[in-house]
Amino acid sequence: MSGKSLKMRAEHKAPVIGESLYLWAGNQVDLPRVHDSLQKRELTSTIDVYQLSTADWSSHLTRGTPPLGVMAYSCTTSHSNIYYFGGDCGHDDCYHNTLNVLNTIKMQWTSCSNAEQLLMKKCGAGMISLEFDGAEYLVIIGGYGSTPTVYHPQFQYDQLKTGRVRTNEQLLYNVSTGQFIVPSVSGQCCPPTSSFIIEKISTTGNRGVMFGGKVTVNGDGTL
């Protein structure tokens, strides 16, 4: 590994596309604890890339507007794109429900959706990319955050002592049409869960597996 010094951070993701690992944002010591500012944008406009074949790190300046949900966001990849959903803003209890994509070839941010009133603002959710009937979807599951504007009856919402809400809510995003769908579900759904691991099973194309996380016991989170 090269001698490049990386900032200490937590509550981040490190998705891999091809031979490159991408490290963006997270909870950092020098992250401004504000909703938005020039200093915060400058910090989150840079992404660190690790080349697996050469063990070298490099920093890249992105174009466009990076997401405000910089901590505990949901993340998945599709082709040369990295999708980021929701996340914690880094100040107070400010959560987001926007979906953004980073094109890793152009290093360009694009907003896939504006703040959707029907979508809960949250962090700690899981997201994977799956295919159904020839169409590509992003599947977003669980998480915790602000009290939702709309409660969907097929899902559960646990009120926490902190004032936050943990859920097992599921969302589908059609990549081709740019539309969010709140699906009906069958079978045994997980309880309201956050901060878990979810991975796509690549051999099947339309399945994923989730493990661990936090659930609610007497209004608190437990592993």
Image (spheres, grey):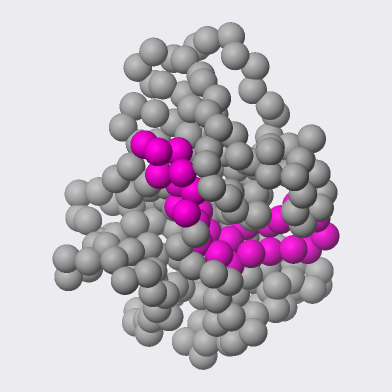
- Measured as percent of width and height from the top left, residue 156 is found at 56, 81
Q: Quadrant of residue 196?
A: bottom right
Outermost residue, bottom side: 153
Outermost residue, left side: 134
- Check if residue 202 falls in the magenta segment: no
Relative to residue 123, is residue 209 drawn left or right? left
Outermost residue, top side: 3
- Check if residue 98 falls in the magenta segment: yes
- Residue range in magenta is 84-110
**Eyeballing the image, is 195 above or below 163?**
above
Q: Residue at x 77, y 49 (%)?
A: 37
Principal SS element in the magenta part? loop
Q: Residue at x 46, y 44 (%)?
A: 108
**Eyeballing the image, is 70 above or below 50?**
below
Q: Residue at x 39, y 65 (%)?
A: 139
Q: How many marks?
A: 0
Q: Assign the C terminus to one quadrant of the image.
A: bottom right
- Say which of 168 and 132 sits in front: 132
